[in-house]
Amino acid sequence: MDDIVVVESPEEFTVVTVGETGPRGPGGGGSGDLSDATPLMNGTAGPGVAEEASRSDHVHPVDTSRAPASHVGAGGTAHANAVAAGAAGFMTGADKTKLDGIAAGATANATDAQLRDRATHTGSQAIGTVSGLQAALDAKVDDSQISAFGLTLVDDADAAAARTTLGLGTAATTAAAAYATAAQGVKADSAVQPGDLAAVATSGDVNDLVGFPGGTTNFLRADGTFNAPAGGGSGDVVGPASSVNNRVALFDGTTGKLLKDSGLTLSGSNTGDQTSVTGNAGTATALATSRNIDGQAFNGTADITVIAPGTVAATGKTTPVDADVMPLADSAASNVLKKVTWANIKATLKTYFDTLYSTFVNPMTTAGDLIVGGASGAAARLAKGTAYQLLRMNSGATAAEWGGALQCIAIACSDETTALTTGTAKVTFRMPFAFTLTGVRSSATTAPTGSVLTVDINEAGTTILSTKLTIDATEKTSTTAATPAVISDASLADDAEITIDIDAIGSTIAGAGLKVYLIGYPT
């Protein structure tokens, strides 16, 4: 038996037999299949005639061409947003915000341009709210403070109209150079005027000239006036009224026109060519009283040579000879000019310098010798040295001598860390040259403890020390030794064999890193 499934709905039920190809229902038992057709979107209401059943997951298409008459949701009845100057509807949130921002009673009947135009404004505005308005008004002048003439001048359109108002005509535009100066005006006022020449122009008689004084003694002056010259025109000269008879006249100034009294009087008979003048001789050849010039007598009868400028102007001479003379002012004879020979000058200078400097005697006899200070500072001879020697001070620091420079020969007797051991000939080497000892030293990298470290130095197997070289316990150098070394043989021969013995190394800790130093100079 087939299984039966009953599907109920509020209006009907459907019985589906599993295994059958279609549902069965109240309308009769059909055997139709499930429909593959797309469900209808629109149509007239009716029971339908199809024998195929719709599937349970079928979906009807949404009809976008039809809006619902109305429905109520959370925001109210739903329909399209309102269109400006068009269909009514809901407003958007942005439109609502704009509407809320408009004040009650706001003007809505003017454009933005009209609202910005001050001509459309009414009411009053305080002057202080307009930047700079009060200052501009304060700077203006009230017309009541200006005369009618001044207002006319202000109203003139240009400079030409202003000149007309002022009555200047063309004078205001004429250059200053076209007018006469004040001085020229004075001359013009006193000069002969054109009207004064009218009668002269027809008669030709100068006496018809208006203002002409007439007479033969009046002359026309440079300033255009007539006047009689001083002196009456008879050759008279103009001079002071206080002039004294027989005094010589002098020009007063440089014009050559005025004279003055010189105060000088000529007396006696002075006519013709004068060959004799009182107080002097016309034939004088010498001064009545001789005079000295730079120590030389001068009476006018001959030239003299003044020493200073004469010397500068004279011809030079490079090498003077004994007979040459030099000028000399003798201080012992009131500075009278005298002469002195070059031979006298040399002899005098030698005598003077001999009192200041000792006579030098050359002590050298051989090329290469040196002059050194001897006893009491006298010059002494130091004979030349040998090859490679240097000049040095002797051991007593009393005199110079030749010899080698102070040197040091350092010998390492062990490595730096290994503890020393006693023994002979720990180091053997040969002298590179003859050497004179002035001192010996030793040092250790590790200080001995418990007792001293003792070293002996031998030349050809024989010690050169009468007191051996030691480094005290806990010390690293022989320079602090309680008993200094004493050299018994200071002369080491060239190529001599030198050996170094270690006689003691320290009883607790042996020293290490031993070095020995031979100090002296090559000989």
Image: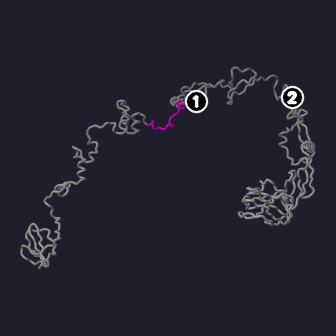
Front-most of residues 110 and 36: 36
Q: Position of residue 208 (x, y in %)?
A: 54, 27
| Horizontal relation, residue 253 to residue 176: left or right | right
- Please say whether residue 523 is one of the residues in the magenta stretch: no
| Horizontal relation, residue 102 to residue 24: left or right | right
Q: Quadrant of residue 269?
A: top right
The part of the chain drawn in magenta is 170-185
Q: Amino acid under label 2?
A: Ala
Q: Amino acid under label 1?
A: Asp
Count residues near mark 1 (Cα–Cα under 10 Å), then give few for <14, some for 14-19, many for 20+.
Answer: few
Front-most of residues 64 and 446: 446
Q: Is residue 359 visible?
A: yes
Q: Position of residue 303 (x, y in %)?
A: 87, 37
Q: Which residue is tagged 1?
A: 223
* Residue 392, above or below 160: below
Of the residues under marks 1 and 2, which one precedes in the sequence?
1
Q: Which residue is tagged 2?
A: 281
Q: Position of residue 304 (x, y in %)?
A: 87, 37
Q: Secondary structure at mark 2?
A: loop
Q: Quadrant of the C terminus?
A: bottom right
- Please say whether residue 176 is one of the residues in the magenta stretch: yes
- Closer to the observer: label 1 or label 2? 2
Q: Quadrant of residue 106?
A: top left
